[in-house]
Image (cartoon, rainbow, N blue to C red):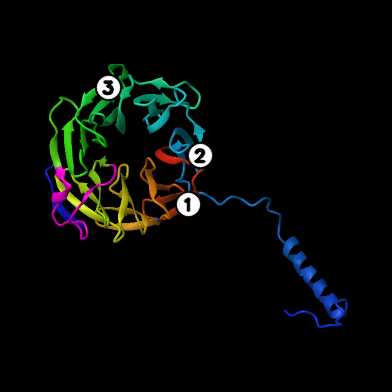
Amino acid sequence: MEVGRAVPPRGGIASKGTDIRSRPYRLLVVVSVVVLAACTTGRPETGPPRAPSVDPRIGGTLLVFTGFRSGLATIELPGDDPRPLILPEEGAFARGAFFLPDGSVVGTLQLGFDRVGAFILSEDDPPVALGPALRGEFTFSLSGDRLLAARCVPRPNAFVLDLTAPSDSWRETPGSCGGMLSPEGDAVVWSPNGRVLLGAAVEGGGDADSVLDVAELSNMLPGMDEGVSIIGTLDWGRRGIAIPLGTNERQAAAVMTPDGGVDVTALGNRGAGLGAALAWQPGGKLLASAAWSNLEAAVRLSSGDETRVVAIHPDPIAGLVWSPDGGVLLAASNTRWTFVASDGTWLRSVPVPRGESLPLAWRSP
């Protein structure tokens, strides 16, 4: 781990002529039958084979993308079929979704060519729109009751919707593509160019401040001295802002702590960096990371003092989702789901459920 500073904000054949009806062979056949009978009748009947037991920590409900990330569904763990959520119109497809504290689902949907809207979705009832549709291409972030829509094109900026009062509509705020809300929902950070991290308050309409320039981090890891950039989605938790970094040679996770310090941890030792994902443990201090290169795709847990590889995947990791209590991590690729306990114990690995499901969020039973 390296520390820098910044501005705060996975037997032979019987010989010819042998009579197989001779006594020694008849005796052998009789003995074989007796032994077989002993093996099959000396054991009590137990009924059909039982499915392997599943760790009780793997429970609750998952919110998932389905149909190559065009639809949304819920899955009851440890592994039911996806139950589709009703979308508002023909041609609408999902861009993101979140569980709200009451268990309902808010989905962000592409409506036609250039419109995006937020809706309360369910399996049985028609969707309920939350505010008017926005025009452009967006990424989304949820913190508490605030939903952030960060626009990528045509003009980078951001909008915030108070889900407790959606009639107040979207309010414009500083930000751009890839923006992430603070845990309190009162600030947003984003990178306009993959190098500089900017931050601003959601309220007040103030100007953005430079928070971090990743190219100026001191004591950068070997192989990351030049060409470093932000290569994935930020995750802002109570312990700081987690930033995935990469070059053509390797990847790293930078954590900007509340006091302005920046800790940099390597994600793998070699291979051209192709992508990385980060996810803070709810209510804990672990940072889950998944990095994939041309040589490996590994899932790691970092506590600040130690980083451990807890799973290896045959292909890139498409998502990291923690259970609500932070006890279990789900690492999902396009072929398998792997469940790992927070202490690094492997719990379960299963093929991706029917419908090309990609997990987005996890809710308690």
Residue 107: % across, % down: 39, 29
Residue 2: % across, % down: 18, 57
Query: Which amino acid type corresponds to the residue marked 3 in the rendered image?
Result: Trp
Q: Quadrant of the N terminus?
A: bottom left
Viewer-proximal residue, 45 or 273?
A: 273
Kindly indicate whether the residue at mark 3 contacts the one at mark 1 (C-beta within 8 angstroms): no
Residue at figure coordinates x 22%, y 59% from the top left: 223
Q: Calculate the distance from the C-alpha at mark 1 to the C-alpha at mark 3.
A: 41 Å
Q: Which residue is mark 3?
A: 170
Judged by its main secondary structure, the magenta piece is: loop
N-terminal label among 2 and 1: 1
N-terminal label among 2 and 3: 3
Q: Which residue is mark 2?
A: 355
Q: Which residue is mark 1?
A: 349
Q: Quadrant of the C terminus?
A: top left
Q: Total of numbered circles in the picture?
A: 3
Residue 101: % across, % down: 36, 30
What segment is highlighted magenta in the picture? 212-233
Query: Which amino acid type corresponds to the residue marked 1 in the rendered image?
Result: Ser
Query: Which amino acid type corresponds to the residue marked 2 in the rendered image?
Result: Gly
Viewer-proximal residue, 240 or 228?
A: 228
